Image (tube, rainbow, N blue to C red):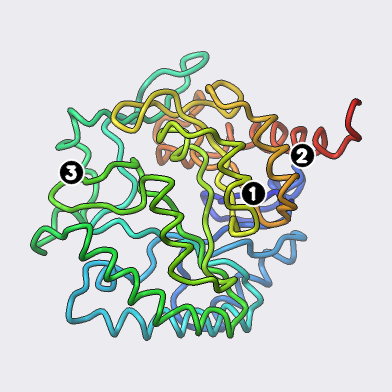
Amino acid sequence: MQLSSVVTPFDDENLARVAQLGVSAVAIRYPGLELRDLLETRERLSRHGLKIAAIEGELPIQNAILGTTDQANDFSRMKQLFAIMGEAEVPICCYNFMPATDWARTDTKVRERGGSLTTAFRSSDAESAASLHSISLSDSISPISSDQLWSNLQRFLEELLPAAEAAGVALAMHPDDPPLASFGKHARIMNRLEDFDRLLEISASPSNGICFCQGNFAAMGVDIPDTIRRWGERIRYVHFRDVQGTADDFIETFHDNGPTDMVAAMKAYRDIGFTGPIRPDHVPQLAGEEQGQPGYTMLARYFAYGYIRALIQATELPAGC
């Protein structure tokens, strides 16, 4: 398994630190469509002994998700993206299919262990969550149904999987966050195990895969190790995190302070032969980081690296040790 991370801010000091702590690859945001820019990022990482694990976030796909008249432009941009990813040997594009928003929380200052700050979601306060995302405020599209979203996803995959496969890129679908059947005025379609089964049935292409975000699947109430084994090699990327609660009402926890049996989860990844990138996802903010971006500060991420490395090494031991 490749211990991976986001790095915020993305500067040489932080890159040096994560490399020193055992990270081997870094997930980056959508870099645009210039091969030169992607190669420059790859070279910058290589100076620290790091590679690009995946591209995720801020992808130009909202028109494709919503099925607008501009969706062809999204398809064209994504095909260009896959082409430069292939040239730069970037293996994974992590995406979601949430219309007109991204991950949402209703509180970013809930107290976790030792007074650290973490994020939470409560569906009764969802109206305030929508205001956190400018894309939601500018959303003028009529409400979209689950049937429309499935139709749009079918076309999305039919258009893009051949280009992704030709470039050697895996598409990894991230669950809805929070994993609710609707959010705001729109339906959502990636919030149950059956939804992911249906996703995989659309195409058997090796480029049609899953980003297994443990926090979202934990909020769905599923058995995490069993679900990892359910999808096996179709899991191409792992967001390692945990939550306490349900899809309607949860808080994010430290990696070692939630309800999921993380040892059993790591053993399941070992059992399916997972060798892709695994990264700590959202983390609490520690003292002195109160002004940082919720979920994406660095200090608790350092703790998570050691925790994840220990789990990886523990599952390498022979049975009975």
Say the numbered circle drawn on residue 312: 2
Q: Which residue is mark 1?
A: 278
> How far is mark 2 from mark 3, CA to CA?
39 Å
Q: How many angstroms separate mark 3 from mark 1 (CA)?
A: 31 Å
Dot 1 falls on a residue whose secondary structure is strand
Taking 95 as reference, is 191 above or below it? above
Looking at the rendered image, the disc whose residue lies closer to the viewer, 2 or 3, is: 2
Assign the C terminus to one quadrant of the image. Answer: top right
Query: Which mark sits nearer the N-terminus, 2 or 3?
Result: 3
Residue 168 percent coordinates (x, y): 62, 78
Mark number, residue 131: 3
Picture coordinates of residue 165, whole percent (x, y): 57, 80
Mark 2 lies on a secondary structure that is: helix
In front: label 3 or label 1 = 1
In which quadrant of the rendered view does residue 207 lie? bottom right
Q: Earlier in the sequence, mark 2 or mark 1?
A: 1
Q: Residue at x 14, y 37 (%)?
A: 127
Residue 25 at x, y percent in the picture: 68, 57
Mark 1 surroundings within 10 Å by alpha-carbon count, few (fewer than 14), some (14 through 19), many (20 or more): many
Residue type for callout 3: Ser
Q: Tell me whether circle 2 and circle 1 mark residues in contact (CB < 8 Å).
A: yes
The amino acid sitting under disc 2 is: Ile
Which of 95 and 138 lies nearest the eye of the viewer? 95
